[in-house]
Image (tube, rainbow, N blue to C red):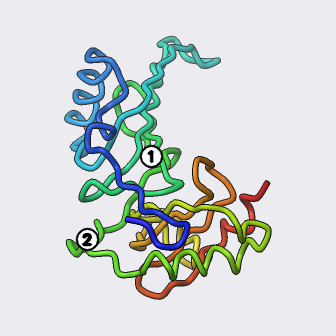
Amino acid sequence: MAAGCISEVTVDPDSTANQVTPSQGAAIDNLFRLNNLSTANEQFLHLDSIQYLLRGYTDSTSEVEVSAYRWYYNFPVFLWSDVLIFYNDVFQPVISRYYTGQPPGPDTTFRQSLESLHHIFQLQYPPYLDSCLTAQPGYFDANYLDPATPAGTHLVKGWKVTPANRAFPMALVADNTGAAAWPILLFTD
């Protein structure tokens, strides 16, 4: 779909497949099972582990870090990745970074028009008035719109708008209001 010089980008569901090896996937499944954590809505990207001996201790500690992108209803959560830390197979929530809020509601109809998204982007980035743009539907952390909202606790249904074939500059736009989120000021050329 295109409007003016903006087109909607959709995600191929196959691109949401895990990026870890089968043995890493099995290790992740085991860690999550041992800690009663759900693997739903996660696209696992990385598993890293290290063994070390802390000064004053006689037994070594095993630390495992699992990184994952989060998805809901086949839509990505932009600018967010979960990083879960385990010591000796026990989840460490205090030092992990992961989404703790409720999943977004089941309404996956995006209502902002491409024309509106094009206009919002051009208001934020006048040097890109003649650029073709892409708009991708998904979710983003509500903290980007309102810094008073704790990060990782609420998602907003919205759009990521960028120049075609480029990652930046980027505008995150709330679907229900058309409000542009603060990262637009940070991610410029």
Earlier-in-chain disc, 1 versus 2 = 1
Q: Residue 176, located in which quarter of the rendered image?
A: bottom left
Q: Which mark is residue 108?
A: 2
Point 41% across, 45% down: residue:
69
The CA distance from mark 1 to mark 2 is 22 Å
- Of 136 and 7, nearer the camera is 7
27 sits to left or right of 139: left
User: Considering the image in quadrants, where does the C terminus appear?
Assistant: bottom right
Image position, residue 127 (x, y; %): 79, 68
- Of 54 and 13, nearer the camera is 13
Point 62% across, 49% down: residue:
166
Point 42% across, 62% down: residue:
8
User: What's under tag 2, amino acid-wise?
Assistant: Thr
108 sits to left or right of 47: left
State whether residue 169 is above or below residue 60: below
Point 20% across, 35% down: residue:
33
Location of mark 1 (residue)? 82
- Of 99 and 142, nearer the camera is 142
Q: Which mark is residue 38?
A: none
User: What's under tag 1, amino acid-wise?
Assistant: Asp
Image position, residue 155 (x, y; %): 41, 69
- Of 138 and 83, nearer the camera is 138
